């Protein structure tokens, strides 16, 4: 589809370019031809006046033929030059038009592919819990001897799937509506916010060791979005680390940015999967598909980018995994 659109756009660019070139060429040709004819006429008139030319104007037909010949020759030379120039413009402009068309459509093509992939992945993620619920309900309906405990187990299982769908829908809605221009921006104390989110997950500070700087680090941001960012990073570290293992989180000043670094032990992320951890619906550990939708880190990346910051990850197989979020400090 985009190849055809590129060729069509190239054709339109080239049509516009050649139209301008031809109009310009015809204008130049007409003006130059008129000027050449006028100058040759003046030349003939001067040479035909007695005493002003070596031949004294004794043969007017000779001068007339000479003038017409020179004019026709000049017109042919001008026309040939213009045709040559237009051919160069046609081929050169065609190549440039194609490159410009490709550059114009490249971002649209990437966006279209990402949207198609996102829609496909979202459909798959929504279809999986719905299929599980449908199967369980069909089995329950067909069972003539469904006990109260079986019904309770069925309802609990369906409730889990509904909760997954609710969380997935909420995250999808957040991703679709994430727009910096529509957010309420205000000064945010990252130290206070990091403490609140950490205590929510680890009230007794048994697993998460949070290190805070002496000075307050204030960023100009949307509080809810930054809270969501910290929540995702902490939840991800807890989810993908062994039970009861220690997790370190450090908030510090790094140049003109506030740096939030969180490190957890575990299986680590292989080098070939590391570049994809921020892709939507991507899971580095396929064996843990039930633990999340694969949208958390994608949302975290969007939040950091929206606030003109950077989010990076370092890891390897069977090594610690470290995420670092850099957010510009309020000036």
Image (spheres, grey):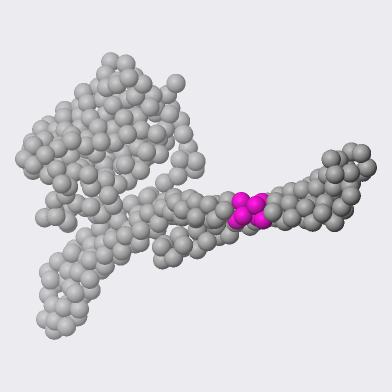
Magenta stretch: includes residue 80: yes
Query: Picture coordinates of residue 222 (x, y %)?
Result: 42, 36
In the image, residue 12 sits, relative to residue 303, either above or below, namely below
Q: Quadrant of residue 199?
A: top left
Q: Residue furthest right?
A: 50
Q: Residue furthest top?
A: 214
**Residue 298 vs residue 52: left or right?**
left
Q: How many marks?
A: 0
The residue drawn where x is 82% and y is 51% is 63
Magenta stretch: includes residue 15: no
Write the start and end of the magenta stretch as one range.
76-83
**Residue 312 vs residue 55: left or right?**
left
**Residue 308 vs residue 39: left or right?**
left
Can residue 219 be seen by looking at this rendering?
A: yes
Query: Picture coordinates of residue 172 (x, y %)?
Result: 35, 54
Image quarter hosting the C terminus: top left
In the image, residue 64 sits, relative to residue 249, either above or below, namely below
Q: Quadrant of residue 254?
A: top left
The residue drawn where x is 44% and y is 65% is 4
Query: Picture coordinates of residue 175 (x, y %)?
Result: 37, 50
Image quarter hosting the N terminus: bottom left
- Residue 37 versus residue 305: which sits nearer the camera? 37
Q: Quadrant of residue 22?
A: bottom right
The residue drawn where x is 32% and y is 60% is 117
The majority secondary structure of the magenta stretch comes to helix
The residue drawn where x is 23% and y is 62% is 161
- Residue 274 versus residue 267: which sits nearer the camera? 274
Can residue 152 be seen by looking at this rendering?
A: no
Query: Picture coordinates of residue 109 (x, y %)?
Result: 40, 56
- Residue 328 versus residue 95: which sits nearer the camera? 95
């Amino acid at each position: 589809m985009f190849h055809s659109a590129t060729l069509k756009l190239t054709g339109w660019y080239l049509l516009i370019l050649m139209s301008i070139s031809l109009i310009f060429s015809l204008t130049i040709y007409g003006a130059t031809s008129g000027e050449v004819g006028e100058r040759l006429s003046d030349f003939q008139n001067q040479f035909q006046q007695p005493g002003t030319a070596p031949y004294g104007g004794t043969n007017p037909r000779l001068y007339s033929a000479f003038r017409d010949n020179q004019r026709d020759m000049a017109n042919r030379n001008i026309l040939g030059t213009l045709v040559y120039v237009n051919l160069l413009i046609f081929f050169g402009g065609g190549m440039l038009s194609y490159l410009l068309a490709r550059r114009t459509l490249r971002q649209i093509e990437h966006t279209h592919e990402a949207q198609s992939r996102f829609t496909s992945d979202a459909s798959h993620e929504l279809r999986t819990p719905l299929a599980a619920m449908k199967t369980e309900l069909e089995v329950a309906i067909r069972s003539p001897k469904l006990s109260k405990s079986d019904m309770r187990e069925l309802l609990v299982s369906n409730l889990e799937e509904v909760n997954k769908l609710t969380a997935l829908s909420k995250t999808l809605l957040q991703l679709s509506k994430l727009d910096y221009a529509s957010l309420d921006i205000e000064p945010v104390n990252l130290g206070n916010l990091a403490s609140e989110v950490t205590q929510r997950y680890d009230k007794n500070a048994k697993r998460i060791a949070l290190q805070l700087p002496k000075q307050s680090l204030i960023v100009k941001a949307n509080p809810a979005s930054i809270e969501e960012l910290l929540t995702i990073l902490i939840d991800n570290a807890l989810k993908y680390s062994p039970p009861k293992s220690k997790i370190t989180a450090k908030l510090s000043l790094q140049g003109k940015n506030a740096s939030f670094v969180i490190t957890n032990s575990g299986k680590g992320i292989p080098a070939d999967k590391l570049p994809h951890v921020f892709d939507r619906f991507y899971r580095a550990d396929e064996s843990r598909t039930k633990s999340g939708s694969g949208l958390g880190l994608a949302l975290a990346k969007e939040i950091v980018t929206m606030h003109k910051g950077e989010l990076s990850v370092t890891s390897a197989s069977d090594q610690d995994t470290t995420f670092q979020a850099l957010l510009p400090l309020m000036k």
